[in-house]
Amino acid sequence: MDDVRNINHSILAAAKNDEYAGFDPFDGLNSKLFNIAPSLKKGLFGLAWIQLHKRSILNLRPVLGVPKARNPKGIGLFVLGLLEDYQRTGDAIFLEEAVRLGDWLLEQKSDQSVWKSACWGYHFDWNARAFFVPKGKPNIITTVYVAQALYALGTQTEKQAYTDAAFDAASFIVESLYINDDGRKFFAYIPGESAFVHNASLWGAAWVALVGNQQGNDHFKELALLVARQSVAEQGSDGSWVYGARHHHQFIDGFHTGYNLEALHIIRKALSTAEFDSAIERGLAFYKDTLIKDDGTAKYYDNNPYPLDMHSVTQVVITLLKVSGSIDDYKLARKVIENSINTLYMPTKKRFMYQKHKLFSNKVDYMRWTQAWVYYSFAYFNRMVAEPNETN
């Protein structure tokens, strides 16, 4: 698909031009106004401030002193995409750029004197309903995606520093995030919090399983299985998962469902187990039947397609190609991409908008949430289409 390659080329060029710095849906607390009253970041005011920036169709950040910045997870996604393009084309320029960004990621580890092992967090203070997370405090999702990128880069370049950091991240997950609380055994989203979220816990299990297999660490492998079983036990009879255990987490959405399936697939491959095959099969069937419409629309929620969001689209592409890999699912992934180009791509700006709601669109340009995910997933699709018999 030449249009997919051309779009991705434009997205990468724009990101490079900005040195991969951009805005983020959740970066509102980076406003320089909080230099005057930093205590307002916490509590209802901080939560409302973040939601104002996230939901506004006008980008208020330049006016309110929120600078563009690099996000470690976003950089990790660009590294993964660059390596996909390198493997597809053999063009060393992609590898050179991935190395440059990988070196930056090594410099961005969260405070090692506190956390001991390699880990990463966001570049902004983050106020959620469940917790407040200061800038730089590590979280499991950022850590896992950065670790994946560094591991892939280490594999490609044979540079041990990348691989060592990626493997060390599993130690952080085991030592700082494992929770046995209220009858559940799982990996927490951030250190010191006990909110149970399926995709976070499963991604932690996936990385611990992969590293456990690579290092022959039986404790890691057993812990990964234990944690994965917790989420599998709570899978709905229809194959679905709600987001998490708390009362405001009782929703089912597309990209988190895709995360769960991708993570379980990594676990079964790493540990050579068929234990989760049935859960993956049922989850994948629910995903395709309920969260992807016949016209290729990637739905946000199981009961509502809106807001249309490229995050939903990109995870569909990755889930279908990585977890399934069937010819029919290649075709379905192509259909979803084509639909997203028709509904969410802005040709004059050569990028994707953030979200389209039923009555209005939010066209703010977000680097980590939107463009980085598009670049990685489209690059992955392009390579897999070039190698149609290969599955990852």
Image: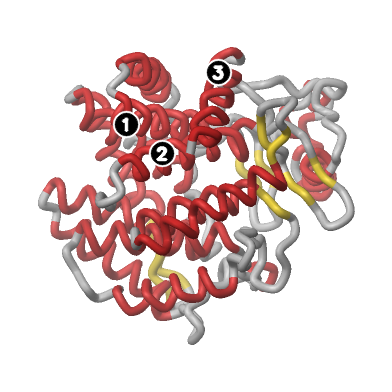
Position of residue 281 measured from the top left corner of the image (x, y, whole percent): 37, 75
Is 154 left, or right, of 124 in this rendering?
A: left
Indicate whether 182 appears above or below 29: below
- Residue 130 percent coordinates (x, y): 65, 57
Residue 13 got which mark? 3
Amino acid identity at mark 1: Arg
Question: What's the residue at 66%, 66% (across, down)?
Answer: 301
Nearest to viewer (mark 3 / mark 2): 2
In the picture of the structure, the residue carrying the numbered disc 1 is 88
SS state under label 3? helix
Badge 3 or badge 2: first in the primary sequence:
3
Regarding mark 2 in the picture, which secondary structure is present there?
helix
- Disc 1 versus disc 2: distance between alpha carbons? 8 Å
To which residue does mark 2 refer? 382
Mark 1 or mark 2: whose residue is earlier in sequence: 1
Looking at the image, which is closer to me, 377 or 171?
A: 377
The answer to whether marks 1 and 2 mark residues whose Cβ atoms lie closer than 8 Å is yes
Does residue 189 lie above or below 326 as drawn?
Answer: above
**Residue 272 image point, x, y percent:** 16, 64
Viewer-side residue, 276 vs 104? 276
C-alpha distance separating marks 3 and 2: 17 Å
